[in-house]
Amino acid sequence: MFDINSTTNLSLIVAIAQNNAIGRDNDLLWHISDDLKRFKALTSGHTVIMGRNTWNSLPRRPLPKRRNIVLTHDTVFCDEGAEVAHSISQVIDMVRDEDEAFIIGGAAIYRQFLPFVSRMYVTWVWQDFHADVFFPVIDLSVFNKINESERYLDDESGLTYSYCEYERRPVDNKSVFKAKM
């Protein structure tokens, strides 16, 4: 198992509907221009880590001004602009010296990396959506909400959304020790 303190440079960025929906048919559920601009501003100049389906769904590959890592079990996969990894530990080793690297999806990648991220940038879209992909419920005993924006209205889609940042709570070694006794 990995030491969570050695992976504090991993962040996760995701847009989630109020019913935790994040996608359908390997596509986004909505288009909110300001949210896409925020994604670009936060991730530009950093590494983005994604699964193969997310890579394939990108309208432009690789994402410009970012190092693109694709995590896949396919040992023969290669694509121009993608650095390929085959395990979580390999990804963590690849980004160990970076100040911040972003997990950008899909659902299986989010679930696999959730135990290792120190920060989450979440766009909450305040509507339920019919979907086939969902984000896990955020455990507030593990993450603190450290920032929340006001609610915004996207004029084009009519959707209301807000931005939240979550930070992993420090591990209390005393309670872990007591629990083991």
Image (cartoon, rainbow, N blue to C red):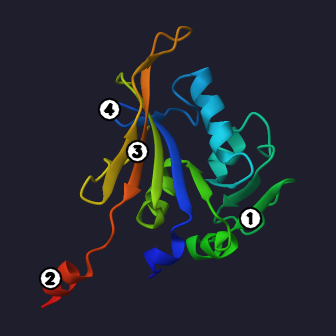
Residue carrying label 4: 19
Task: State left or right for residue 105 relative to residue 163.
Answer: right
Check disc 2 and report its element: helix, strand or loop.
helix
Quick check: marks 3 and 2 in contact, CB under 8 Å?
Answer: no
Q: CA distance from mark 2 to mark 4?
A: 33 Å
Q: Foreground mark, 1 or 2? A: 2
Residue carrying label 1: 84
In the depicted structure, whether residue 92 falls above or below residue 130: below
Of pointers 1 and 3, the one earlier in the residue sequence: 1
Within 10 angstroms of label 2, few (less than 14), some, or many (20 or more) residues?
few
Quick check: marks 4 and 1 in contact, CB under 8 Å?
Answer: no
Number of dots carrying numbers: 4
Residue carrying label 3: 135
Q: CA distance from mark 1 to mark 2?
A: 39 Å
Quick check: marks 2 and 4 in contact, CB under 8 Å?
Answer: no
Check disc 4 and report its element: helix, strand or loop.
loop
In the depicted structure, whether residue 103 falls above or below residue 161: below
Q: CA distance from mark 4 to mark 1?
A: 32 Å
Three-letter code for the amino acid on which mark 1 is drawn: Val
Check disc 1 and report its element: helix, strand or loop.
strand
Of pointers 4 and 1, the one earlier in the residue sequence: 4
Q: CA distance from mark 1 to mark 3?
A: 24 Å
Of pointers 2 and 4, the one earlier in the residue sequence: 4
At a point 26% along the width and 75% down the height, the residue shown is 172
Three-letter code for the amino acid on which mark 3 is drawn: Phe
Q: List x then y, in percent, for residue 138.
A: 32, 49
At a point 79% along the width and 56% down the height, the residue shown is 82
